[in-house]
Image: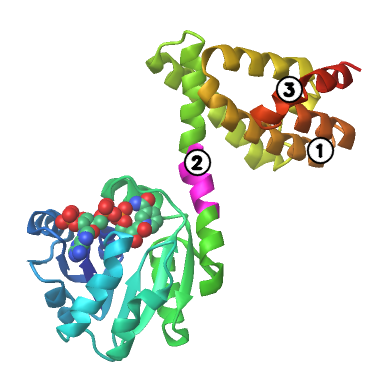
Amino acid sequence: MRIGIIGAGAVGTGVGILLRRRGYTIAGVASRTLASARRAAARLACPAFEGAVDVARRADVVFITTSDQAIGQVAASVAAQGGFRPGQTVIHMSGSLTSAVLDPARQAGALALSLHPLQSCADADRAVANLPGSVFSLEGDREALPLGKRLVTELGGEYFLISPEAKPLYHAAACVASNYLVSLIDLSRRLMQAAGMEPEMAARALAPLIKGTLDNINEKGIPQALTGPIARGDFGTVRDHLKAMEATVPELGELYRALGRYTAGLAGRKGSIDARKVALFGQILAAKFEAASGRAGVRGKAGQ
Ligand SMILES: NC(=O)c1ccc[n+]([C@@H]2O[C@H](COP(=O)([O-])OP(=O)(O)OC[C@H]3O[C@@H](n4cnc5c(N)ncnc54)[C@H](OP(=O)(O)O)[C@@H]3O)[C@@H](O)[C@H]2O)c1
């Protein structure tokens, strides 16, 4: 089975390297620039082509691993040049798009799949290291699903069959776990720096805390892994946080409050605070404007 890769970035090159290790022949690689195609080709021991259609013609399985916004356009252009045919399977690896974006390939008689790894791949080497052990969502033509499952197994992953309608929610979940986690850690670093810690030290200091928390989640699950002032019902500490942030980094307060309200709900689910305390945290951590107008009332109650 000959594999073609269109889009010589992190995922395309990484998948190519892993499949080659499993004995697949990489028939060729193309990209937006010939330089990228050549760089990937050197690692995949295959020819680099200027035209995507040249790769598609030589391949039984065509991976379109361009940026998401280019997938449809590449599929249409290759189809218009006669690069797709019956017996071929065309695959993209976007988390947000469905296999419908590959309809031009279907119209030429090929089968289409979307195969998305729930993984973050900063470059090809990270993809090679991270993809094995990942869960891949799989969606597309029924006849092509056995091939999709087999490819996931070859990549060392586990598959999850998803409906096209569910992809936006699935992708939102992935963005929260990956992208928003990065944002969350950045938020924490900025607060550390506001407290006087050098950026380099803040990065180093937070790493073991983050790792310990992930270990707790793996071991105890959610919500049992939740610790801290909200889980303990410590209103005074949270009020102190808000006061200090208001004085030094007020622009970070909105996000802190929103996450705090979510965390209060989680503490309620854990059972470490009761419904009344969850509601009180909701008031203390209300959006800034409401909090300011209702401050006196909240203070009185929370001190009970
Ligand atoms: N990276 C991740 O963490 C990750 C995780 C899961 C899924 N994915 C999915 O994997 C796919 C690839 O993502 P990536 O992170 O590997 O992207 P990437 O590193 O930015 O690579 C995209 C490659 O596509 C090429 N390209 C862009 N437009 C093109 C066009 N019109 N024709 C041909 N090649 C084109 C670029 O070529 P040049 O280098 O020549 O400019 C680039 O090498 C996307 O669908 C993405 O959603 C990525």
Q: Earlier in the sequence, mark 3 or mark 2?
A: 2
Q: Which residue is mark 2?
A: 180
Quarter of image, res 231: top right
Picture disc at residue 75: none
Question: What element does badge 3 sit on?
Answer: helix
What residue is drawn where x is 29% and y is 83%? Answer: 105
Amino acid of disc 2:
Tyr
Residue 168: image location, x then y, percent: 51, 63
Image position, residue 157 (x, y; %): 46, 61
Q: Secondary structure at mark 1?
A: helix
Where residue 268 is drawn, which disc sits there? 1
Whole-percent x and y of residue 176? 53, 46
Q: Main secondary structure of the magenta part?
A: helix
Q: Nearer the viewer, residue 276 or 131?
A: 276
Residue for point 61% across, 12% down: 244
Q: Verify whether residue 178 appears in magenta.
A: yes
- In the picture, the quarter occupied by the C terminus is top right
Q: The disc labelled 1 sits on which kind of residue?
A: Gly
The residue shown at (65%, 19%) is: 242
Vertical comparison of 90 with 303: above or below: below
Magenta range = 173-181
**Label 3: which residue?**
229
Residue 302: give x, y in percent of width and height: 85, 20
Q: Where does the N terminus fall, quadrant-wise?
A: bottom left
